[in-house]
Image (cartoon, coloured by chain):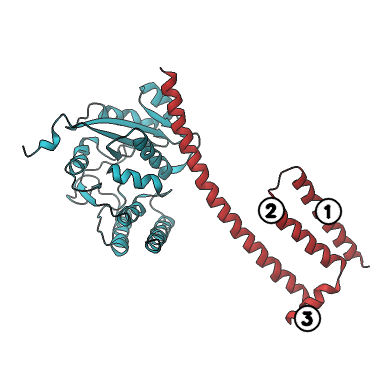
Amino acid sequence: MDKIQILAIIAVLFFITLITRFILKGKLRTEYAIIWGLMGLIFLVFSLWRQSLDLLAKFFGVYYAPSLIFIFFFFMIFIFLIHLSVVNSKQHEQIKKLAQEIALLKNCLHNTGNG
Amino acid sequence: MLFSFLSANINHKVLIIIPCYNEAQNVALLYNELHDLKVEGCTISPLFINDHSSDSTKDKLMEMGVKFLDNPINIGIGGTVQLGFMYANEYEFDFAVQMDGDGQHPPKDLYKLITPLLKKEADVIIGSRFIDKKGFQSSALRRFGINFFSRLNKLLVGISIKDSTSGYRAYNKKAIFELIQYYPDEYPEPEAIVYLAHKGLKIKEVSVTMNERVMGVSSIRRFSTIYYMIKVSLNSIFLHLKMKSNG
């Protein structure tokens, strides 16, 4: 086993521990936990079984195997960022709605408070 | 008998929605003008909405002892005006008028916006500075933008509103109901025309004389940027396509 492989395995284990901790502490919603958990598993497979990347590259007809990683992860990250933008837009609407309701409720409370 | 619709026994409740963001210097002036304002056949209630101003707008409003709503966070001009529509609906107002808190929109012209609603001539009345070309006409760049949106609106929904960005508008109950369902967030005026036209509401433009801002800098709507033009155009086009595909 090369040094870099050991390093990769340690990094992946650190990553998985981090995700697990966030899940256990309830800081990560389940849908994100699933995505990041899967990511962790994919990392783990690649770091334990080095030839897997070369085999995959050969299968897809990619000459330079590491570029496969870049394509794959760029794609994944893009999709995930779009997803986050959608979530963000939705939350923006929800926060606005809540603020409007609170302003109306504050007005109601004020009215009843004055008799 | 011609003006029987104005008879005193039919009293229409009119809500004046005044969104305020850092308008501490302007609110008192505006309130004084609104205070003695009378439109026949109507009871006028001003409603200031403080959009979480960072200056002393809230203190000023409390000092003045006027009716106002206080947003817990800054939600922008669109959400703030929409909150006014929600209030109008909740307390069963017949008409709602939106008026800028910076003194650009003259309260004395209010009757010009209300009268066509009373006569049931339209559902939405827009106060326009370009019909009689009186008063503050805005900068050349801004006029270019306003004209651009007029053409875009004409292209999308086939109606021609000259002062497409004017925020001095009056709505009847039907329009208020639709605006509660949807109102754009930022720079809402041109897009709102597209929305209201799609909802089948009748829109009419009347002449008003606008003033320059009384005091302070307009931070609630900065017009001069290309970003504004692109964003509002895209919003309008997207909204048009969305509403068209939904029937």
Res B215 seen here: no
Q: Quadrant of the C terminus of chain B?
A: bottom left
Helix, strand or loop at disc 3?
A: helix
Q: Which chain carries label 1?
A: A
- Relative placement, left or right, of A71 versus A65 is left
Instruction: Indicate whether B181 appears above or below B12.
Output: below
Q: Nearer the viewer, mark 1 or mark 2?
A: 2
| Amino acid type of the residue that numbered disc 2 sits on in the rendered structure | Tyr
Which of the 4 quarters of the picture holds residue B80? top left
| Amino acid type of the residue that numbered disc 3 sits on in the rendered structure | Lys
Q: Which chain carries label 2?
A: A
Q: Residue furthest front?
A: B247
Considering only order in the chain, which callout, 2 or 1, is on the residue closer to the N terminus? Answer: 1
Label disc, if present, on residue A14 of the rendered structure: 1
Disc 1 vs disc 3: Cβ atoms closer than 8 Å? no
Residue that label 3 marks: A58
The chain shown in cyan is which?
Answer: B
Q: Distance between the residues labelled 2 and 3?
A: 31 Å
| Amino acid type of the residue that numbered disc 1 sits on in the rendered structure | Phe
Helix, strand or loop at disc 2?
A: helix
Q: Quadrant of the N terminus of chain B?
A: top left
Colour chain A is painted in: red
Residue that label 2 marks: A32
Percent of width and height locating residue B183: 39, 48
Considering only order in the chain, which callout, 3 or 1, is on the residue closer to the N terminus? Answer: 1
Q: Distance between the residues labelled 1 and 3?
A: 30 Å
